Image (cartoon, rainbow, N blue to C red):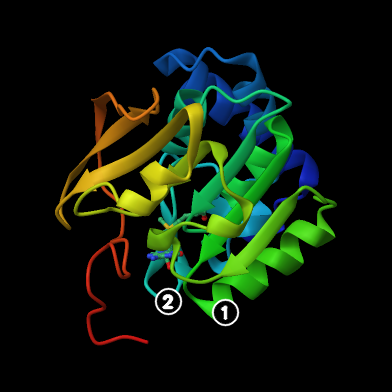
Amino acid sequence: MAPTELDERDFANLRRHMVESQLRRRGIGDARVLQAMEKVPRHRFVGETVRWAAYDDEPLPIGLGQTISQPYVVARMTELLELNRETRVLEVGTGSGYQAAILAEIAAEVWTIERHQVLAERARELLAALGYTNVHVVRGDGTLGLPEHAPYDAIIVTAAAPQVPAPLREQLAEGGRLVIPVGDEFSQLLRVVVRRGDVFPERDVLGVRFVPLVGEQGYPPRGET
Ligand code: SAM
């Protein structure tokens, strides 16, 4: 069958297979994360030309030089946030909106911030069309966080930062968790930071590769808008 002829049933089968082979088999154990990954139609978050590859074990382009992350990385980062039905989450780097949809399946409320207007609008429309009423897409510089809705029980950054932006640390609730890739443009380590009063213990858990976090507390823009 030509990839363009895939229908919703085919996508559901590919999604089940992705959860089994890429997530469960590699140690993702949080049932809420696995359920969310099995439910959210990842193929709706990518363009038609790459839709057939939506459930492959890799990141995909979403325009403006940006990407939707590999399913395993989405699942692992979500698991590290230790979400529950009461959690209020901030995501920095909306991109396609896929990670926001996964968060919205598990948490109470999700704020997600994107620096590119086009991506923010597209994600807002798609998330609304899919029926998500607990996700709020904001356009702006996420390296400054979103102080008007802080504190957050969980913060996830889906772009590579040179260091942990201080505003994000400050906007964590007591006991809150921040998951962020830290490193240079070629490779980063996924860092988990926890707030214990004024102390922020942290650990690095996984090597990853993300597009850069561009902003006041991130990398400078490189000849783009
Ligand atoms: N989470 C996304 C998804 O599910 O599709 C993938 C995110 S993509 C790897 C990184 C995103 O971060 C890009 O859309 C990029 O424009 C955005 N970004 C980079 N710097 C940012 C900043 N300072 N504030 C907000 N978004 C930023």
Q: Indicate whether 195 appears above or below 24.
A: below
Please state the horizontal and vertical placement of residue 62, each as a whole percent of the image.
49, 66
Q: Indicate whether 148 appears above or below 187.
A: below
Tell me which corner region of the image, top left, top right, bottom left or bottom right, holds residue 148.
bottom right
Q: Which residue is mark 2?
A: 64
Assess disc 1: are there few (<14), some (14-19) or many (≥20) residues with their C-alpha within 10 Å of its C-alpha: some
**Residue type at the position of mark 2:** Leu
| 151 left or right, relative to 131 | left
Assess disc 2: are there few (<14), some (14-19) or many (≥20) residues with their C-alpha within 10 Å of its C-alpha: few
Tell me which corner region of the image, top left, top right, bottom left or bottom right, holds residue 16.
top right
Task: Confirm if mark 2 falls within 8 A of ligand 1.
Answer: yes
Residue 96 appears in the rendering? no
**Residue type at the position of mark 1:** Val
Q: Residue at x 28, y 61 (%)?
A: 212
Q: Is the C-beta separation of discs 1 and 2 under 8 Å? A: yes
Q: Which residue is mark 1?
A: 118
Q: Indicate whether 160 appears above or below 75.
A: below
| 132 left or right, relative to 213 | right
Q: Nearer the viewer, residue 107 or 65?
A: 107
